[in-house]
Amino acid sequence: MKAYIVDKWLKGPEELTLKNDVTVSDPKKGEIQVQVKAAGLNFFDTLMIQGKYQIKPPFPFTPGGEYSGIVVKSTVSQFKPGDKVFGSGYSFAEIINVPASNALPMPKNFSFEQAAGLYVTYPTSYAALVLRANLKAGEYCLVHAAAGGVGIAAVQIAHALGAKVIATAGTAEKLEIAKKNGADYVINYRDKDWHEQVKKITNGHGADVVYDPVGLVEQSTKCTAWNGRILIIGFAQGTIEKIPANRLLLKNISAVGLHWGAYVRNEPERIPEVWRDLFNLFESGKLVPAVYEKVYTLETIPQGLKAINERASYGKVVARVGSPESKL
């Protein structure tokens, strides 16, 4: 079968090599074997192949973090061959063995492409806004990089929770995408006075919650409300900034981190709670995954990662693996 194999740290996605003769082993106890139908692409995929991510798999490994597909073999009772699932695993391959604990049944109304991007982005955004920031209906929620994978999920979730959503992005096209997905107000963060625009929109109140996957905490403190909560999701701009502690003190601001992947180890009891609420929102139609208009293939995954890294994409970037009707 075909799979990307990484046996040394790479400079970037352009160095990824697709192997055509990779052997597939049987799933171990507690695992399921999945025919991948679509793979979700993330910014951290590039960091991982470069050796810059907090998780460094031993060589050789198959990169990729999210997938959707069909169960081929199962060692557990909750899944059987033919079941449609999505989850996390080293997914840039045609066939993968993954822990059953990292898989969930696909929402019935979603395509493989939509489901491939659910497992990381939506619980990350939901846990941040609900568990960490306690976002309430009527509050102002400022979402940076609002047309990106986690950003657009945050916009949709904040809107579904009844917040007034202010979205930032770097182009008119991305701002329009954010509006279509629930943003009440949009601001181009390339404008030098974007934080003043936030204050104007909120009539001087400021943003009650700031969702930041980029690294704009320092500037965001200028337009955060009294008792505001700034959610630190990531550092897509490439640098880890220093937080001005005096501004946190003067405005009673809380700077709050969110590492969804660490809940498995530290608060596993919260995971089912988050997924239960998300499935309710999926099934009600309040959350519909926004998939980037260009769907890549297994062979063109490096191009998809490049589009994410260059901020040329919006929503969730996915790659279709095999043909829609292919079966083993």
Image: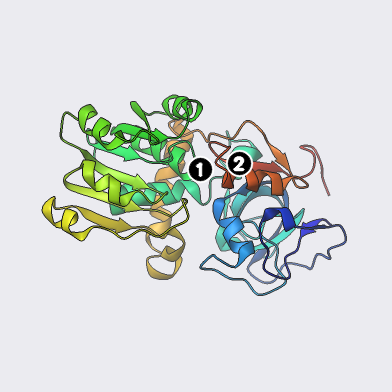
Q: Relative to 268, is 231 on the left or the right?
A: left
> Is residue 103 visible in the rendered structure shown here?
yes
Return the residue at label 1. Answer: 149
Q: Is residue 255 above or below residue 200?
A: below
Q: Residue at x 16, y 28 (%)?
A: 203
Q: Residue at x 52, y 36 (%)?
A: 289
Question: Residue 154, position in %: x, y?
Answer: 40, 41
SS at mark 2 in the image = strand
Question: Residue 122, position in %: x, y?
Answer: 46, 46
Question: Residue 239, position in %: x, y?
Answer: 43, 58
Q: Residue at x 68, y 64 (%)?
A: 10
Which residue is outermost to the right? 21
Contact (CB < 8 A) between labels 1 and 2?
yes
Q: Nearer the viewer, residue 238 or 177?
A: 238
Question: Residue 246, position in %: x, y?
Answer: 16, 58
Which residue is outermost to the front? 192
Q: Is residue 7 above or below residue 304?
A: below
Return the residue at label 2. Answer: 317
Quarter occupied by the N terminus: bottom right
Q: Nearer the viewer, residue 157 or 239?
A: 239
Q: Residue at x 44, y 32 (%)?
A: 284
For the residue carrying disc 2, how many other residues have a C-alpha within 10 Å: few (<14), some (14-19), or many (20+)?
many
For the residue carrying disc 1, how many other residues have a C-alpha within 10 Å: few (<14), some (14-19), or many (20+)?
many
* Quadrant of residue 191 within the rendered picture: top left
Whichever of callouts 1 and 2 sits on the residue coming sooner in the sequence is 1
* Quadrant of residue 46 within the rendered picture: bottom right
Q: CA distance from mark 1 to mark 2?
A: 8 Å
The amino acid type found where label 2 is placed reads Val
The amino acid type found where label 1 is placed reads Gly
